């Protein structure tokens, strides 16, 4: 085990034993001190058991990691999550793509975040970090491509929890500017509070018109629990109209003429377009879900019932609407009259 030169070459080579075999490799330098440092580092890695790990991921880039993640991990996820993974991988590859994994440090990730903050909000940044972290976890814990997950050192962005609902005037103005194909989706969203992904992928087998209910299996729900959503008259009429026009080979409630379901992005973009044209650019599709919960609370429905209808896993999520319960607030204030 040591340094040597080959023939007339001035480059130093190193020879060392690994797992009972003699390994000969170029150090890539003509400086003996540097070559000796490189050889010492290899010896240390072998002694600490890290050599094999460092060799596995030596030439792996972020693009390699993202490609393998999309091939091996993403297919087991829900359709809308698969689309998200592909989008995040493409976005991250524009910055990290050619970097080797050992070059992607917490400092480099911070530089990326500074650039992204100029274009997107905290929520988008956190979703991108989540994909980056999940990919590194696989590369680190399962594939042996790197020695750590640098994302673990990065603090997530603070997301502002917003509760926004529509006045009658605002909603009617927006609704009048919607494309015809998206109007039934918006009406059902406003009257059921279902998430965009659940609406986009809603199948006829999940709709029970006779019993006026939609039953969603836990596999498609964010909280992994089955949801039975009762339908009010507006929702029944929306689905009933679509049912009359339905073609037998169409399995999705909302779909193109060829039977393919509308995408989350397409629905969201169509709604956003109408909001902007109506003069309310701050609204987004998810606000229809907030509107559903807000109006229930304003009508005197208790928070636990709202929790069940919204499919919230924890009551703390529902409590963001508590301040809208006018009846309870009035009762609380009126208690002071008894003390006067």
Image (tube, rainbow, N blue to C red):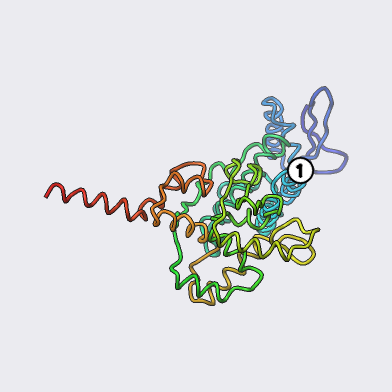
Residue 339 shows in this picture: yes
Q: Position of residue 320 (x, y in %)?
A: 41, 51
Q: How many other residues sit within 10 Å of disc 1, few (<14), some (14-19) or many (≥20)?
A: few
> Which of 282/211 is in front?
211
Q: Position of residue 209 (x, y in %)?
A: 65, 54
Q: Is residue 164 left or right of residue 2?
A: left
- Name the foreground residue: 288 vs 130: 288
Q: Residue furthest front?
A: 210
Which picture quadrant has residue 197?
A: bottom right
Report x, y in % for residue 220. 65, 46
Instruction: Determine whether, in the image, residue 148 is placed left or right of residue 21.
Output: left
Q: Secondary structure at mark 1?
A: helix
Q: Quadrant of the N terminus?
A: top right
Q: Residue at x 62, y 69 (%)?
A: 270
Q: Which residue is mark 1?
A: 72
Residue at horizontal 62 percent and vertical 63 percent from the top: 238
Q: Residue at x 76, y 61 (%)?
A: 260
How many numbered badges does the structure rendering display? 1
**Extreme residue toward the right, this view:** 7
* Percent x, y of residue 328: 31, 50
Question: In the rendered image, which quarter is residue 18 located in?
Answer: top right
In this orientation, does residue 96 appear? no
């Amino acid at each position: 085990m040591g340094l040597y030169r080959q023939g007339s070459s001035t480059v130093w080579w190193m020879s060392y034993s690994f797992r009972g075999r003699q390994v000969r490799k170029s150090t890539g330098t003509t400086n003996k001190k540097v070559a000796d440092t490189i050889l010492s580092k290899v010896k240390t890695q072998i002694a600490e058991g890290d050599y094999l790990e460092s060799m596995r991921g030596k030439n792996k880039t972020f693009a390699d990691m993202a490609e393998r993640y999309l091939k091996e991990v993403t297919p087991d996820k829900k359709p809308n999550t698969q689309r998200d993974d592909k989008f995040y991988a493409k976005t991250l590859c524009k910055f990290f793509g050619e970097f080797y994994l050992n070059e992607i440090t917490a400092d480099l990730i911070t530089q990326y975040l500074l650039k992204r903050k100029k274009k997107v909000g905290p929520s988008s940044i956190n979703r991108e970090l989540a994909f980056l972290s999940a990919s590194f976890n696989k590369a680190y814990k399962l594939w042996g491509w790197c020695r750590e997950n640098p994302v673990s050192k990065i603090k997530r962005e603070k997301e502002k929890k917003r509760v926004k609902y529509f006045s009658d005037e605002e909603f009617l103005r927006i609704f009048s500017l919607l494309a015809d194909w998206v109007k039934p989706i918006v009406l059902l969203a406003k009257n059921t509070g279902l998430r965009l992904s659940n609406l986009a992928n809603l199948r006829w087998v999940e709709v029970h018109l006779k019993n006026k209910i939609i039953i969603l299996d836990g596999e498609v729900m964010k909280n992994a629990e089955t949801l039975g959503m009762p339908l009010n008259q507006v929702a029944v009429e929306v689905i009933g109209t679509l049912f009359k026009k339905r073609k037998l080979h169409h399995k999705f409630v909302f779909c193109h003429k060829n039977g393919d379901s509308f995408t989350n992005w397409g629905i969201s973009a169509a709604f956003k377009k109408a909001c902007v044209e109506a003069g309310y650019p701050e609204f987004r599709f998810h606000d229809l879900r907030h509107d559903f919960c807000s109006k229930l609370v304003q009508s005197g429905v208790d928070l636990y019932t709202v929790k069940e209808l919204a499919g919230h896993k924890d009551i703390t999520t529902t409590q963001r609407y508590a301040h809208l319960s006018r009846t309870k607030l009035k009762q609380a204030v009126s208690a002071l009259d008894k003390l006067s």
